[in-house]
Image (cartoon, rainbow, N blue to C red):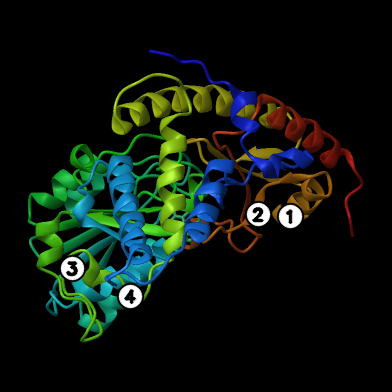
Amino acid sequence: MDTTWDIEGIRSQYPALKDGTVYLDGAGGTQVPECVIEAIGDAYRSGLSNVHGPFASSRRSLQLIDGAREAVADLTGGPAGGVVLGPNMTALTYRMAGALAKTWLPGDEIVLSELDHDSNVRPWAQAAASAGVLVRWARVDPLTTDLPASQYGELITTRTRLVAVAAASNLIGTMTDVAAISAAAHAVGALVYVDAVAAAPHFRLDMGSLGADFITVSAYKWCGPHAGAVVASVGLLETLHPDKLDPSPNEVPERFELGTAGLANMAGITAAVNHLADLVGGTGDRRQRLDRSFAVLRARENTMVRGAISRLSAIPGVRMVGAPTLRTGTICFTVDSLSPDQVAVRLGERGICVWSGHAYAWELTRALGIRASGGAIRVSLSPYTAASDLEELVTAMTSIVCEPVPH
Ligand SMILES: Cc1ncc(COP(=O)(O)O)c(C=O)c1O
């Protein structure tokens, strides 16, 4: 297997990196490579029209959508015919919550997790409240931030209809044991809705081995355009009937797609998945190449994250948040003398982009007792992150903690 990570070659494909900005906010959103920009530009340049029209530009639009479905299917290990495309994960999850809640009865139950981004919590909690459905909560271990899968045995009952869980935390990088959670859910016939938005940029997804009935991703987290997808089997989607316009297609997956798609972005989705597949050299079909890229990416990020944690922890006053058993390329910390926002502002002044605050990990920051004090600072890696980016971060953090404390 070719394991060469040509970091300079990869970085040269990203126009946004050319001004020297250090982007360590991939969990918020990544930069895009030239091939994605070109694909989107080419789509517009070649002429696009509404789908299902009797002319070439309309057929091109349909091809772009079909291409994006196939690309997301390769990324997630799901069926292309079950890829629902939309503006972002939040909108799609509200859409799915509305459709699934129609199948719930008062007294049914769902299980949500404290670890999750609020977009995999609130749509379900609100749908449950309207349907008279009980919400049970999976808790994180406050020290490690692990989400013990063992608790699901007690949380899941014969009334459980849905378990919604993240494959990885967007704030801390904590990875969850989705396969074990899914097995517990499936034992009572409950469906599993997996938020893989924070996982997809860091490790290889496979719906089958995760046991996910639904899996969601957002392309702008993996070097693509601002668009999202939720994937499920065609058979499962056929059983659901979301609110929709009378004349809009009733076929699956179009039944779930509201209004006109961001057509040019569809070309960008495909280009982004192709880019991920080609991050390391080698042959094979796209899924095999994705396997290879993610195997190398994961090993690389593990090494970089370990190094960054150890260097940052050595800076006086810096405290890591959580110590998960398995994590993505995301880390999270606080600083004794400065608020997370103050740190992010000071790093921003030095051209280093990191996120600060709760990052919509709303229940998690409450559970960890850090929400009221401004959350935490999040640093997250992307395929284009260089070792020198982390060096710059450590150097900047060292000088920031030595500066006089503002009043
Ligand atoms: C884990 C996770 N889930 C869901 C979302 C929401 O995604 P979107 O912006 O596509 O609605 C985010 C966005 O940051 C996220 O990190």
Residue labelled with disc 3: 109
Specify which label sits upstream in the sequence, 1 or 3. Answer: 3
Q: How dense is the environment of label 3, judged by Cα within 10 Å: few (below 14), some, or many (20 and up)?
A: many
> From the viewer's perspective, is 360 left or right of 15?
left
Residue 275 lies, in percent from the top left, at: 47, 36
Three-letter code, disc 4:
Leu
How far apart are the alpha carbons under marks 4 and 3? 28 Å
Q: Which mark is residue 356?
A: 2
Residue 134 lies, in percent from the top left, at: 22, 72
Q: Nearer the viewer, mark 4 or mark 1?
A: 4
Q: Secondary structure at mark 3?
A: strand
Label 1 residue near ligand 1, CB within 8 Å: no
Q: Is residue 85 above or below residue 382?
A: below
The reply to whether callout 1 and callout 2 are in contact (CB within 8 Å) is yes
- At horizontal 21% and vertical 74% (from top left) the residue drawn is 99
Q: Which mark is residue 339?
A: 1
The reply to whether callout 2 and callout 3 are in contact (CB within 8 Å) is no
Specify which label sits upstream in the sequence, 4 or 1. Answer: 4
The reply to whether callout 4 and callout 1 are in contact (CB within 8 Å) is no
Front residue (pair 7, 397): 7
